């Protein structure tokens, strides 16, 4: 899945510097991924032997992490995928509001109808929460693969790109069967932090003005599959704004978490084009313990490329051993 701020290509970088910070392995450590996004970092920590506390306020993100962290061995799931992929297309909610025929070309007409059928079919599994969550998370990945966007859902492309013309197929989301006591939350990070305790707190908050609730609204719509009045040209649903997407509130919100964190170590990912300056983050974090940072050049998220902007940005990793 193409995702703003994804750390999929930075996992080795994160691992190296976090292990150096704690002077130990992840095995048995309680690691919290408080802004989990696509779930890739939390899943990585879990594969390294950590017990993961994962959180994100966005429902689609909650489902992705829950599927990756709390799915065990699902007997007969291959047959479930076959049965769902065999369903006939239906002209449901997505077709009516988010297909080319609707005027919002997020999906081809054919794919919108097929995704409607898949989403409706998955409801039959709702009493089996683990299987239901896994199938739904797999649908989010599969639908995203054929979305007619430049990677985010704040806008759709006028003409269908080649990838959007490929027929959608429900494919299994990769996961490692888990039997550890991972926990997954769908709460406001600042409200949740005082309820958590562990060894390592990893923070990857929004860093610019683009609200995730708007950028990924269609994934939430597929996940909820509810009825509402789509707003405007892009068919937005109601969403909660993040304090981290406003220059006037981001630092205060971040310091609230660092101050309240009942964790031995706090690790923050941010980049040099974020709303907060490097100097302001450094000054704040130094108040709470032994502080250091490292940086690495990183390619810009592809949806934000243009000729007037540099293609490389610097990813900062702020490392704090709390006093």
Image (spheres, rainbow, N blue to C red):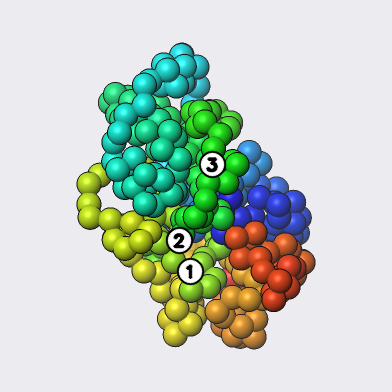
- In percent of the image, x 45 and y 21: which residue is there? 85
CB-based contact (under 8 Å), mark 2 and mark 1 = yes
Residue 49 visible in the picture = no
Q: Nearer the viewer, residue 291 or 293?
A: 293
- Name the residue beneath numbered marker 3: 164
Q: CA distance from mark 3 to mark 2?
A: 16 Å
285 relative to 265, above or below: below
x, y percentage for residue 18? 69, 58
Q: Nearer the viewer, mark 2 or mark 1?
A: 2
- Name the residue beneath numbered marker 1: 210
Q: Quadrant of the N terminus?
A: top right
x, y percentage for residue 232? 31, 63
Label placed on residue 154: 2
| Element on which disc 3 rests | helix
x, y percentage for residue 82? 47, 16
Q: How many marks?
A: 3
Q: CA distance from mark 3 to mark 1?
A: 24 Å
């Amino acid at each position: 899945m193409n995702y703003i701020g994804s750390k999929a290509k930075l996992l080795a970088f994160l691992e190296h510097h976090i292990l150096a910070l704690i002077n130990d392995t992840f095995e048995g450590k309680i690691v919290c991924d408080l802004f989990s996004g696509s779930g890739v970092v939390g899943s990585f920590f879990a594969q390294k032997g950590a017990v993961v506390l994962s959180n994100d306020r966005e429902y689609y993100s909650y489902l992705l992490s829950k599927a990756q962290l709390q799915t065990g061995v699902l007997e007969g799931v291959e047959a479930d995928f076959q049965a769902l992929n065999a369903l006939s297309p239906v002209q449901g909610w997505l077709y009516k509001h988010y297909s080319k025929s609707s005027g919002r070309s997020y999906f081809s007409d054919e794919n919108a109808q097929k995704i409607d059928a898949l989403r409706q079919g998955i409801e039959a599994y709702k009493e089996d929460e683990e299987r239901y969550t896994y199938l739904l998370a797999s649908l989010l990945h599969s639908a995203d693969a054929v979305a007619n966007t430049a990677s985010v859902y704040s806008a759709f492309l006028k003409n269908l790109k080649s990838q959007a013309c490929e027929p959608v197929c429900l494919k299994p989301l990769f996961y490692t069967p888990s039997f550890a006591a991972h926990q997954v939350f769908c709460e406001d990070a600042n409200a949740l932090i005082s309820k958590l305790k562990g060894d390592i707190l990893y923070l990857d908050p929004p860093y610019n003005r683009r609200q995730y609730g708007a950028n990924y609204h269609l994934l939430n719509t597929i996940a909820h599959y509810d009825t509402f009045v789509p707003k405007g040209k892009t068919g937005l649903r109601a969403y909660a704004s993040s304090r981290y997407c406003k220059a006037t509130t981001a630092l205060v919100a971040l310091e609230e978490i660092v101050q309240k964190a009942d964790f031995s170590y706090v690790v923050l990912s941010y980049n040099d084009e974020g709303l907060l300056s490097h100097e302001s983050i450094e000054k704040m974090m130094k108040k709470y313990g032994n502080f250091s940072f490292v940086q690495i050049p990183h390619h810009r998220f592809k949806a934000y490329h243009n000729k007037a902007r540099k293609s490389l940005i610097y990813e900062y990793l702020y490392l704090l051993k709390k006093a």
